[in-house]
Image: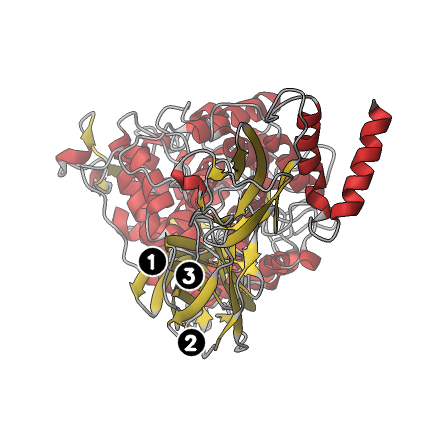
Amino acid sequence: MWTGIGKTAESFREAKRPFWPTSLVIVAYVAVLMGLNGCGSHNAGQSTSLAISSTSNAVRAGDTISFSVQESDGSSGQWKVLGPAANGRIDQSGLFHAPDAVPQPSTVTVSYTLNDKTVTHAVQILNPVPVINSVSPNSVRTAFSNISITGQKFVVGAQVLVNGLAVPTTFVNSGNLQATIAVGDSQSPLNLTVSNPEPGRSTSSPITLPVALQPIAISPAVVTSGAVSVNISGISFSNDIAATLDDRPLLLKAASDSAISAMGFIPPWHSGATTARVYSKSTGVEVATIPLSITPAAVPFDTAARFLTQAGFGPRPDLIQHVQTIGLDAYITEQQSMPVQPYTSADSGIISIIKRSVMGPNPLRMRVAWALQSFLVRSGISQQGTNFPFEQKMEADSTGNFRDVLTDVASDTSIAMMLTLAGNAVPKDPAQHPNQNFARELLQLFSIGSYLLNDDGTIQTSPDGSPVPAYDQTTILELSRVFTGWNYGPPVNSDYTFYGIDWSAPLVANEAQHDKGQKVLFGNVLIPAGQSAEQDRKMALDAVFAHPNLPPFISRILIQRLVKSDPTPQYVKRVADVFRDNGRGIRGDLAAVVRAILLDPEARAGDDDNGVSPSDGFLQEPYLFQLFVMNITGWTDSDAQPAYLPCKLQECVFSPTTVFGFYNPSHRIPGTTINSPEFQLLNDVSLVNRSQALWGILTGQQRGFRQISNAAWLLQNFPDIPDLVDALNHIAYHGRMSTEEQQLIVSYCNQLQTTDPLLPAESAIFLALNADNFTVTH
């Protein structure tokens, strides 16, 4: 049977080849098979040939194709398109009219019926070939343009192609498309086509669209690092525009049809030049790449950040950029010219001093006042308001003369209490002497030290190698007689009066208790008999102020408190020379001394990588550590009451356990020759407590602190962990964090599994600020 069928098919193909397309033979053959099996026959047992063919198996919507039939008996049958009217129509001549739109499904069936026999043929309807008639506007004049394409046979899903690349397209109707095109900086004409989608994807003939771009400009042409605002002109604004500056996204805002304003951020340690890039978000087509210059800074970011660890309480972002702008020397001048801000009864003890140090406009004055109080030790009173009068004196004295410091120390009530100066009177028993506490500490701690010093601060020695004392017991006894007759005055200011003492009022003299006899200090300074307590005190303080030890002794301590714990003798001598003479014949000018300390070559040697020595810098004592962290993390919560963490870290300010304060200026790190007073406060317990305090500050778990938020300077400008770590490298490490350490922090934070979105950032900051390389400031 199958052999016979094969032969019949073969002879059939040969006979009909001139009239039927080869591709249609199978369809016709199926009809033959149906006849051979008795299906659709006119009469039982009778075989009739019936087959149809078409000029194509597919036709585009709206076009026509012809069908024909081969009838063995010459009779006339009926043509029909199966299904709904949307499938098209066919007339009785066999001309098939495809529908105007592709039906679903896209294949339709055409049938031919003769008597009781029906044969069918499948035809696929394809999308039409689009035709472009015109484009409006007829030329491109802006980098981003909305165009309207008028034509024919556009279908849903049609895409406008520009130089072969699809652009965002909106189907309006079969005769209109809207598209947004982005042009690069080329002026070459654009080749526009429209592509209809499958089935039967097709593309129109091209049309050329001339390009006559307006020039794109960005102003200003020179930007300052940090927060940046620029205007981009010559671009027709659309939602498809995007821009970056220094590879960081710009926030765009429409200003007009031909210009937009943009805001962004350039990391302030970037310098030299940057690049603005304008591009299409949807296509990535680059519209413009425009180089911009970054305003040269007076000093690099890293230098300014490091400088503020010496001239303030750590690298506060806004002050860093201010220092960058005006320079180190001008910043010192500006800070020292600011008036002293008075304290009031509304202030709240140490909390107010912390806030003023971190958030206030005059951190240099506050830092020098803190440095002075590190060795001008006094007694703290439980009522924190009693700290303000002495703090106020030190803030004023930080730009004054050290001779005034001596007077303030000798007349202060809190120092008088601690050193039993108040009530010190001539003993009734001539064999006894007045109290020596204040006299001894005035010399040993507050002014000249225990041993004679060379101009560079090194100790003078006798021929046998032993240190030469700066004074003897006779001078102490004589000086104790000078400071008799002083006591607390009557309360004047109720805001500072506690326990019946007005802590803001200076001591007053009681001449009846003052020793009016002759005194001799240092073996050669004569204080004549018969003088008042005030006259004796003035002459004694003048003698102390004139002592040759005073310049190197005080200069070295201030260097330690501001720049480095172990200054070289040469550094001490250079500063001491300024202490002796500020260049205008004035001795003891603290403003000049502080300037000399901060601008000395040894202080500034660490501003570049080559100048750093392992023995440079200082360990951040607890008070500085807390304030440094608050500044770096952008603490600005004026309503909060930050916990006074140093009390937990063995440095409860204004409450030292001894008259020697919290550390000895001569302390050396055990096992080394490095002088570092702050290491006296460092041990295993304090290290753990410091870490816990740091985590509490960052997460808000420490009383008085709120969790660092996205509004903080660091997180707002550096939301990604790698960028954040890079920022910490510059703001906290002055560009010296090792690549390995940065990679370890990034790797650790990126692998954290947490539902807290802030945890990775908190962890990155914690790891950076908990490291030894941060707590030891170089």
Packing grade of label 1 (10 A; few <14, some 14-19, many >=20) is few
Circle nearer the viewer, 1 or 3: 3
Q: Mark 1 falls on what kind of element?
A: strand
What amino acid is found at the position of numbered circle 1 in the picture?
Lys
User: For mark 1, what is the residue?
Assistant: 253
- Left-right relation of 492 to 182: left
Classify mark 3: helix, strand or loop: strand
Say which quadrant the N terminus sits in. top right
C-alpha distance separating marks 1 and 3: 37 Å
Q: Nearer the viewer, residue 736 or 18?
A: 18
Q: Which secondary structure lies at badge 2?
A: loop
Query: What residue is shown with label 3?
Result: 152
x, y percent for residue 561: 51, 46
Q: Quadrant of residue 150?
A: bottom left
Instruction: Identify the disc placed on residue 139.
Output: 2
Q: Is residue 636 left or right of residue 547?
A: left
| Labels 2 and 1 touching (C-beta < 8 A) | no
Circle nearer the N terminus (2, 1): 2
